[in-house]
């Protein structure tokens, strides 16, 4: 088994499994930094994976499909923002509603569009391309890891950097962080917190939809019912453990990716599968406990004795 | 100091009446000169804050005008005020702890490079330049959460200066500072003044005003008592102008018949939530059958003292003995079971559950009592009967006992709270501002109740900003100043308000004299 762990396949598996979660983690981070918990990631992923299949088949192009899916993602983010900020719905309730709509809505929509039940078998969608890097792919191990990844995986890694720069180097990023930390303080210097939170939720929707696109156009080549399978919630945990920063979220997501890939590998051993399937969720649980413990310690260090 | 300085801003005949009918400013005028530190002096509730809210665009005035640099202007919002060169440092800082000092300073007015990015280098440079100019020793790249309170205040001042403030409002800036930090702040304020800026210094600390202010405008109950050159007016006269009371409502009360000691505080030092020491080694006792009135300017440790006695805060050293037993280890419920009742300062925040009905509020401190609760369910009939009795006895004006408490008037809410607290038959009553902001009828009623309980042998501590109340109810009167009693009077009838004012403001302080001997 040790041999398996140190193989390029294993690293590939980590990256592949992390990609959708990574997008969603970044999406969660932006929303959280603006002061809103985006618990609707799960539903956003699911919607995006269905629309990805539909749009890429309509446009016969990967890029057209992706861009339209991102548009839909932004619109869902906008709708969520409208409920929370304009109609003052509780953010958790609005998210639950959106997630429930996604579960049933995607199945219904699929049936209406294609007549398929539960899986988009009759839609000929276009998946994201695999990136082969000439020359590099000939290098043993490194070549196998770097080359042959899905384009969306590269975009996810790129997104980590872009979101980091956005949050920490641009005026808009500073405003998002300011609003999330103390609305009153931000408003006292003339920042409209509502506008900023709208922007953050739309961006969150766009990012999350990219993860959804990968689910049905990369990770798999079709849409299946409930294919997000809790990834939105795992991302929520990953982002919070990473202190809602892009880099932190990235590291935690990789950790989850390792746990998941390890779980897959261990299914080859004699350990009962039920135990193995627990691994990703157990990692989340342990991770969250460790995280909240460090936060508590830090607070008591800064606070009064 | 040259004599004829030009006027930068005038507020003329400002009138502000809040929607609840409180007249906060009555025909107040204020004139500010270029390059002066101008004190705005007055007790809590005198209208200083309202006047500054009008100036900073937070509250629109009902009447009066503002003249800035010779022309009449309207200030519609804080942003508007900032753009007109007025900056304000609030008592509660408007800073973002996780950001750096420089980021806080430039927030909302970020310098940019290549259009999309913050020019952090430029920001740090600009921030440190202003800091240097006014001798602010600050590392602008440090995170705000890591710097002490004194520096945070400087960040707020820098923030205002970075936005081009020529007039700087400081709302009780020294309240959160140590003496050393205060001294440092003063040097910097003088530098700002010499640079031609105008500083409005809100305070009720006379020694500080004497120390750095050029002129002072004194306010009392919404009116201006005049503007004076600080070196031409004595602290005594200032305190006389600032502290005064209206016609006294006398109660014909029996002389107190003090009995055994019910509450004893020994060498108490208490700390606020930020860890700042607010009570310094205070000792006193209260006997059954007497009312100990505690006067004092807000923020001199009264809240921390009350929080310690009622068990709300355990950030204290020393001993608090309730009927001879130390209460440090007692829960709040345990303390209440020892027959201590507490009328909290803020009736909406901690006095009642405003969305619950009157009945539920009346029983929120005794619903576990066997008389009102069975093993599983509440005894609704008993509770209803008792509620009706209490509503009658305490003259609560309401439609029914099922009415939401938040819908009642302030006076009636307070009566519900008082009814709840007093219906347990307390031996010790802690009343913190029991009649603040309520109508005359309810005030009178609550004061009479306090006297009734005193006569029945209750020990009462009354903390109040209303001198009238303090004078008419107290059997002994203590003045709290900087965490201790600056004066304790047993002959309340012969204390003059002038004298009281001097103790409240620390001009006279028996503790400091006696302190060494103890």
Image (cartoon, coloured by chain):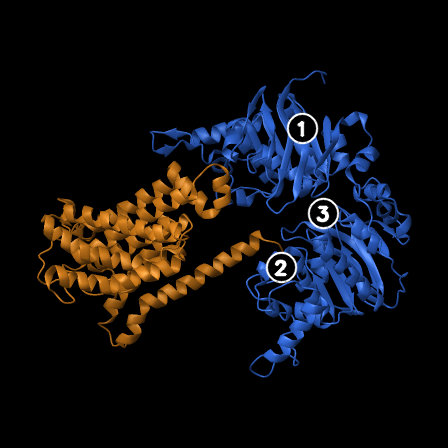
Chain colours: A orange, B blue
Q: Nearer the viewer, mark 1 or mark 3?
A: 1
Which label was assigned to residue A108?
none
Tell whether B31 sits left or right of A65.
right
Q: Mark 2 points at which residue?
A: B350
SS class, disc 3: loop
Q: Residue B472 at x, y = what percent?
A: 83, 53
Q: Which residue is drawn at 40% across and 62% down?
A: A287
Q: Residue A231 at x, y = what percent?
A: 29, 61
Q: In this view, does A187 lie above or below A146?
A: above
Q: Residue B434 at x, y = what percent?
A: 72, 57
Is residue A127 at all visible to an observer of this figure? yes
Q: How far apart are marks 2 and 3 (CA)?
A: 18 Å
Chain name for mark 2: B
Q: Mark 3 points at which residue?
A: B298
Do tags 1 and 2 sit on the same chain?
yes
Tell whether B236 sits left or right of B440.
right
Of labels 2 and 3, earlier in sequence is: 3
Q: Name the residue under label 1.
A: B30
Q: In this view, does B335 lie above or below B498?
A: below
């Amino acid at each position: 088994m040790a041999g398996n762990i140190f193989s390029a396949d294993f690293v590939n598996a980590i990256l592949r499994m992390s990609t959708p979660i990574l997008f969603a983690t970044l999406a969660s981070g932006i929303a959280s930094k603006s002061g809103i918990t985006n618990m609707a990631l799960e539903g956003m992923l699911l919607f995006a994976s269905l629309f990805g299949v539909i749009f890429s088949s309509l446009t016969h192009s990967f890029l057209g499909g992706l861009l339209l899916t991102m548009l839909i993602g932004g619109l869902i983010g906008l709708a969520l923002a409208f409920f929370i900020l304009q109609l003052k719905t509780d953010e958790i309730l609005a998210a639950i509603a959106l997630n429930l709509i996604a579960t049933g809505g995607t199945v219904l929509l699929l049936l209406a569009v294609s007549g398929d039940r539960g899986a988009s078998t009759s839609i000929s969608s276009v998946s994201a391309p695999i990136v082969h890097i000439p020359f590099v792919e000939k290098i043993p191990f490194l070549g196998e890891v770097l080359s042959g990844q899905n384009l969306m995986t590269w975009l996810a890694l790129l997104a980590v950097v872009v979101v980091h720069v956005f949050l920490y180097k641009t005026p808009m990023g500073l405003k998002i962080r300011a609003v999330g930390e103390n609305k009153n303080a931000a408003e006292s210097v003339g920042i409209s917190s509502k506008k900023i939170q709208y922007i953050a939720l739309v961006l969150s929707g766009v990012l999350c939809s990219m993860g959804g696109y990968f689910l049905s156009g990369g990770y798999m080549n079709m849409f299946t019912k409930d294919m997000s399978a809790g990834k939105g919630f795992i991302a929520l945990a990953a982002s919070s453990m990473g202190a809602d920063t892009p880099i932190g979220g990235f590291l935690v997501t990789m950790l989850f990716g390792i746990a998941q890939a390890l779980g897959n590998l261990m299914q080859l051993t004699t350990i009962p599968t039920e135990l193995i399937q627990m691994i990703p969720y157990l990692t989340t649980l342990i991770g969250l406990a460790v995280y909240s413990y460090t936060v508590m310690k830090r607070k008591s260090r800064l606070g009064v004795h | 100091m040259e004599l004829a300085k030009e006027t930068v801003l005038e507020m003329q005949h400002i009138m502000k009446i809040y929607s609840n009918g409180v007249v906060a400013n009555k025909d107040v005028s204020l004139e500010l000169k270029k390059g002066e530190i101008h004190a705005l002096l007055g007790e809590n509730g005198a209208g200083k804050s309202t006047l500054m809210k009008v100036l900073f665009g937070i509250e629109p005035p009902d009447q009066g005008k503002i003249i800035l640099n010779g022309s009449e202007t309207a200030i519609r919002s804080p942003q508007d005020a900032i753009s007109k060169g007025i900056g304000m440092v609030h008592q509660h800082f408007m800073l973002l702890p996780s950001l750096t000092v420089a980021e806080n300073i430039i927030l909302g007015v970020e310098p940019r490079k290549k259009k999309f990015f913050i020019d952090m280098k430029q920001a740090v440079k600009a921030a440190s330049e202003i800091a240097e100019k006014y001798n602010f020793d600050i590392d602008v790249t440090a995170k705000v959460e890591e710097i002490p309170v004194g520096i945070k205040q400087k960040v707020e001042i820098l923030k205002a200066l970075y936005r081009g403030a020529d007039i700087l409002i400081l709302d009780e800036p020294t309240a959160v500072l140590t003496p050393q930090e205060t001294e440092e702040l003063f040097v910097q304020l003088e530098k700002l003044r010499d640079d031609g800026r105008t500083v409005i210094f809100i305070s009720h600390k006379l020694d500080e005003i004497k120390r750095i202010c050029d002129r002072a405008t004194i306010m009392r109950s919404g009116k201006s008592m005049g503007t004076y050159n600080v070196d031409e007016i004595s602290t005594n006269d200032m305190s006389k102008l600032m502290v005064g009371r209206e016609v006294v409502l006398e109660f014909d009360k029996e002389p107190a018949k003090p009995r055994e000691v019910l509450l004893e505080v020994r060498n108490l030092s208490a700390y606020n939530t930020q860890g700042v020491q607010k009570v310094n080694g205070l000792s006193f006792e209260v006997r059954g059958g007497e009312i100990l009135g505690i006067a004092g300017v807000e923020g001199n440790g009264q809240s921390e003292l009350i929080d310690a006695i009622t068990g709300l805060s355990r950030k204290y050293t020393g001993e608090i003995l309730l009927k001879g037993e130390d209460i440090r280890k007692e829960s709040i419920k345990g303390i209440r079971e020892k027959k201590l009742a507490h009328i909290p300062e803020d009736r909406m925040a901690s006095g009642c559950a405003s969305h619950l009905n009157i009945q539920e509020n009346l029983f929120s401190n005794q619903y576990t009592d066997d008389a009102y609760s069975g093993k599983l369910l509440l005894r609704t009939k008993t509770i209803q009967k008792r509620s009706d009795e209490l509503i009658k006895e305490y003259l609560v004006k309401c439609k029914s006992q099922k009415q939401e408490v938040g819908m009642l008037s302030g006076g009636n809410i307070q009566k519900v709270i008082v009814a709840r607290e007093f219906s347990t038959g307390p031996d010790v009553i802690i009343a913190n501002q029991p009649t603040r902001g309520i109508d005359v009828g309810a005030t009178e009623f609550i004061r009479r109740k306090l006297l009734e309980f005193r006569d029945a042998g209750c020990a009462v501590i009354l903390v109040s900003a209303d001198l009238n109340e303090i004078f008419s109810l107290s059997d002994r009167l203590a003045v709290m100043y900087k965490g201790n009693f600056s004066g304790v009077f047993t002959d309340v009838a012969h204390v003059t308000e002038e004298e009281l004012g001097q103790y409240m403001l620390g001009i006279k302080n028996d503790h400091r004299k006696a302190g060494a001997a103890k």
